[in-house]
Image (tube, rainbow, N blue to C red):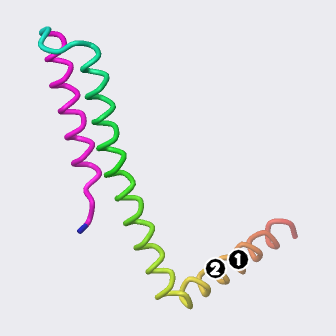
Amino acid sequence: MFPNLFQATTEYWRKLDELELAYQQGKISLEEVDVRVAYLIAELAIERRATFTYFYRICQHWLTTQRRTVISLVILGLLTYIWVLSNLYS
C-alpha cells in the first residue's frame, strides 16, 4: 500500500487547528498542548518515514530491474556532455 504523506500532513494540520482552538477556548492547558503536539509530530514522522522508505524501495527495484538501461543512459549522457564541452572550447 502506498503511504499518503499529503493526506497525513493535511490531517496533521487539521488536528493542530483543533488543538489551537481548544487551547484558545480554555478547554486544555498549555502542558496538554505540548504533549499532544509532540504526539502529532511523532505520528507525522512515522508516515514520512514510511513514504520515504516506500519511495527508496521503488527506486531500488527500478534500478535493479533496469540496470542496463540506466548504465546506457549514463554513458550516453556523459558522451553528450563531453561532446558539448569539446564544441564549446574548440
- Disc 1: CA contacts within 10 A as few (<14), some (14-19) or many (>=20): few
Q: Position of residue 65 (x, y in %)?
A: 46, 88
Say if the magenta span includes residue 6. Answer: yes
Toward the viewer: 90 or 30?
30
Q: Which image quadrant: the N terminus? A: bottom left
Q: Is residue 40 above or below residue 87?
A: above
Toward the viewer: 89 or 38?
38
The mark tally for this picture is 2
| Left or right of 13 on screen, residue 85 | right
Q: Position of residue 83 (x, y in %)?
A: 76, 77
Q: Is residue 87 above or below residue 37?
A: below
Report the magenta residues as a range: 2-24
Q: Quadrant of residue 50?
A: bottom left
Name the residue type under label 1: Leu
Task: Report the residue at 25% width, 56% height from top.
Answer: 4
Task: Report the residue at 27% width, 60% height from top.
Answer: 3
Magenta: main secondary structure:
helix
Mark 2 vs mark 1, CA separation in Å: 6 Å
At mark 2, the secondary structure is helix
Residue 74, numbered label: 2
Name the residue type under label 2: Val
Q: Position of residue 76 (x, y in %)?
A: 65, 83
Q: Position of residue 26 (x, y in %)?
A: 14, 8
Task: Report the residue at 19% width, 23% height from top.
Answer: 19
Q: Which image quadrant: the C terminus? A: bottom right
Say if the magenta span includes residue 42. Answer: no
Residue 78, numbered label: 1
The reply to whether callout 2 and callout 1 are in contact (CB within 8 Å) is: yes
At mark 1, the secondary structure is helix
Q: Is residue 70 above or below residue 26?
A: below
